[in-house]
Amino acid sequence: MTERSARSGAALAAAFLAVMLLSGCNPGAPSAMTPLASTAPAAGVPATTAPAAEAEAGAGAAPTSGPESADTTPCPTTGNTKRFAKIRFALHAGLALGAFQRYIYKPLRAGGFKAGAEKRKRTFVKAAVAGLFAIHELKVAKKFAEANPTLCRGVKAVSGTFASLTSKLKGGSATPEDLQAAQNAFGELQKQATSNGFGFKEKNVTVPGAG
């Protein structure tokens, strides 16, 4: 064996020994033969759904605990003034309503969720993504609605309705009654908002991942 071959063999042996020692010291670490689980987001689900205005609200990133998580933040019992609260509330509530109307309620009226409908599965996927977007926007809107206790409770009620609806959309089990309940909840929120000087209208929105 030449000196060069001996050095190469020694290097390979040292590398193999190092791998074995590292594996033994950390049993929880994946082995070289075990593929790592993918950390990429699921197809069709946006990495973030909040518009730039969310940064002003101090709301942080979109929730990661899923649509089923309940909002337990108590509503205020007295007024709490925030700068441009009405404008910001109207913006985020309008975005939530726009996503709901475009991707959920209008497809419902067109029969897109019925068995046998063309691209029915894709319609459900888009609706679920839009539902997550709407939940997030409603939570941001609530932060600005807290100047009014009644309005705060109204936003929480809509968020709760959407959490249940989105869960059913993801499972493909949403019924027309579920969707109509969400539509009614939005209508009630709009009524409350208007009567308290926080009126908002549907915003034209394209949800990332829903197309």
Image (tube, rainbow, N blue to C red):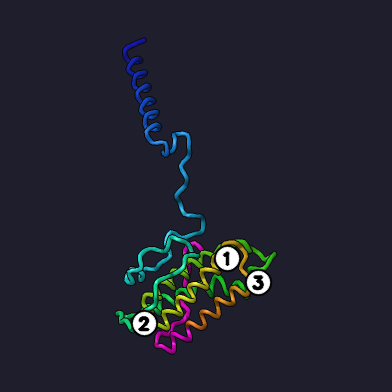
Pointer 1 residue: 169
Q: What is the distance, in whole Å, between disc 2 and disc 3 at their CAs?
A: 43 Å
> Farthest residue toward the top?
1
- Counting residues from the start of the chain, the first of labels 2 and 3 encountered is 2
Q: Amino acid at mark 3?
A: Gly
| Figure quadrant of residue 1 | top left
Task: Tell me the mark number nearer the camera, choosing from 2 and 3.
Answer: 2
The numbered dot on residue 111 is 3
SS class, disc 1: helix
| Figure quadrant of residue 75 | bottom left
| Picture coordinates of residue 21, whole percent (x, y) | 37, 29
Kindly report the secondary structure that dominates the magenta region of the rendered protein: loop
Few, some or many residues within 10 Å of mark 2 (<14, 14–19, 20+): few
Check whether the beta carbons of the residues at disc 2 and disc 3 lie within 8 A of each other. Answer: no
| Picture coordinates of residue 52, whole percent (x, y) | 36, 68
- Magenta stretch: give its range: 190-211
Q: What is the distance, in whole Å, between disc 2 and disc 1 at their CAs?
A: 34 Å
Q: Amino acid at mark 1?
A: Leu
Few, some or many residues within 10 Å of mark 3 (<14, 14–19, 20+): some
Q: Is residue 210 magenta?
A: yes
Q: Amino acid at mark 2?
A: Thr
Using residue 80 as the reference point, say whether residue 178 is left or right of it. right
Pointer 2 residue: 77
Q: Determine whether 134 is above or below 29 in the image.
A: below
- Counting residues from the start of the chain, the first of labels 2 and 1 encountered is 2
Check whether the beta carbons of the residues at disc 2 and disc 1 lie within 8 A of each other. Answer: no
Q: Nearer the viewer, residue 98 or 152?
A: 152
Which residue occupies 32% across, 71% down?
Answer: 56
Using residue 19 as the reference point, say whether residue 167 is left or right of it. right
